[in-house]
Image (cartoon, grey):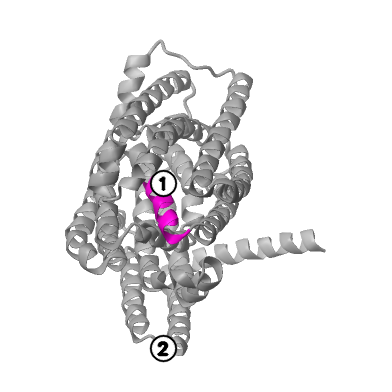
Amino acid sequence: MSYLRRYISSASMLAVQGVFQKILGIFSTIILARNLNSRGFGLFNALIITVNSGYGLVKLGLDGAIHVRMADKDDSDKGNVLGAGLVLLSLSGLIAAPSVFVFSDQLASLIFKEPELTRWIKYAAVLIFVQCLTQFLYATLVGLHRFAFYSVTMVIMSCANLAALYIGIVLGGLQGAVLAVVFIKITTLVLFITYLKRYLQQKRLRFEYDRFRETAIQLLKLGFPFYMVGFVTIPVAYYMYGILSASAGVENLGYMRIVVSINSIILFVPSSIAAATISFLSEANTDIALAQEKFVVYSQLNLKTTWYFCLSIGVILWIFVPTIIRIAFGKQYLVAVTASRLGLFAAIFMVVMNVASNTYFAQKKVSLIFVQNAVYSVGFFAIGVLLVPRWGILGFVFSELIGYFAVAVFVVLLFHLECRSLGMNPNFHWFLLVMTAAAALVLSVVNVLGNELLEYVCGTGVLIAILISGYLLIFSPKEREAFSLYINQLFRKGRQILF
């Protein structure tokens, strides 16, 4: 089977899983928003932010490095990758967990200006250690192309998470919700361990340590730029969340979870197929029989298809954001409408950054990932320290938008130069960038005017313009023909299943 067909097959499987998981994740946010008060919702989100930030700081880029090394066609060194990866990520967790526990009071009081957070941040210590082990298993599974098991397991555990959250809140309020998260994370870890142990036995792979030092150094070198990325971006984001909590109240961390939940709809497909993208681009990049130009064609098609798709979905969501918040989360969260709408465009540019990162990582050009994240962090921080204390959540989201837009310009410039060097058409990158920026500007002006009818009319007009002009100007005739054939096949399979 060709790279493209295997990529589409695995990406489709992960996309379906990702869509289900993200939808269930939104439902978990709905359960939290409707059953906890705004303060409790904000405290819960502060805990989750701490877990994600703590793991991001100590993972050293090892999960990505393990993923790429396990996806290589050469099986001879996979045992040592397993052994070194497990030891390094376990040590990371053992360093991070006690540190967070010991300094929980300082994090709560100095960063968030919310002493009540101390008891909840202590739970983050346990969750960070579990996350380190889980991400080792995840990176190994997707590196070995075990997409089916991973997809099914994550959907099942997402469903279980909904039930556990609801039961936990009913029985114990905020503490019940936190304990439910701990229970689900540990259960997922156990399931991953059980499956991977059996699979490795079948493939006669085992954990090896005879070349531990050499392999560990290789993994750290490959993941080091990601550590540097985390070292820059994560403290910046965590500090900005702290400013938001201190200046506007911890409730705003709950509002931000609403913004993130709505924005995550845009990320359904891109984040879901990221693992497949890295695996197959990594394999393609190491295949000497595959021309460099072919690799660039695959990566360019991935970028423009994802960007075009996310921009279209983003405009649709922009139209219905007030309705979504009112029905799903409740009227008390309508204050987050403007921030959510602005955040949609920040999410689109973030997708561009992530797609580019996947390509750079597959090529092992990880220094470019550090550069683009540094660009984002500088833009986010420089604007955020000025606007967040004054504008609160709106200043936070606008600062993110500026940071991600700066990265999108950087990405487009790099792809433009690469296309020109290979004699390929680079113009679609600039068209996508201008089209996204124009849509954000027009719809932001419409949002300020506050006329609901005008919002529907202008939103629909912008969407139609994007769909038509984008389809005709971004994709080549050959690509449009391939899309049409693929869609026809999907419809045929659908009719066969239904009838």
Left or right: residue 242 versus residue 478 is left
Q: As displayed, is residue 202 above or below residue 464?
A: above
The quarter of the picture where residue 191 lies is top right
Image disc number at residue 48: 1
Residue 364 visible (yes or no) = yes
Looking at the rendered structure, the kind of residue marked 2 is Asn
Asked if the residues shown at circle 2 and circle 1 are in contact, with their CB atoms under 8 angstroms apart, the answer is no
For the record, the magenta segment spans 37-49
How packed mark 1 is, by other alpha carbons closer than 10 Å (few <14, some 14-19, many 20 or more), is: many
Verify whether residue 118 appears in magenta. Answer: no
**Depth order, front residue of 137/35:** 35
The quarter of the picture where residue 98 lies is top left
Predominant secondary structure, magenta span: helix
Looking at the rendered structure, the kind of residue marked 1 is Ile
Q: Which residue is mark 2?
A: 451
Q: Nearer the viewer, mark 2 or mark 1?
A: 1
First in residue order: circle 2 vs circle 1: 1
**Depth order, front residue of 386/35:** 35
* Residue 211 pos. (x, y %): 38, 13
SS at mark 2 in the image: loop
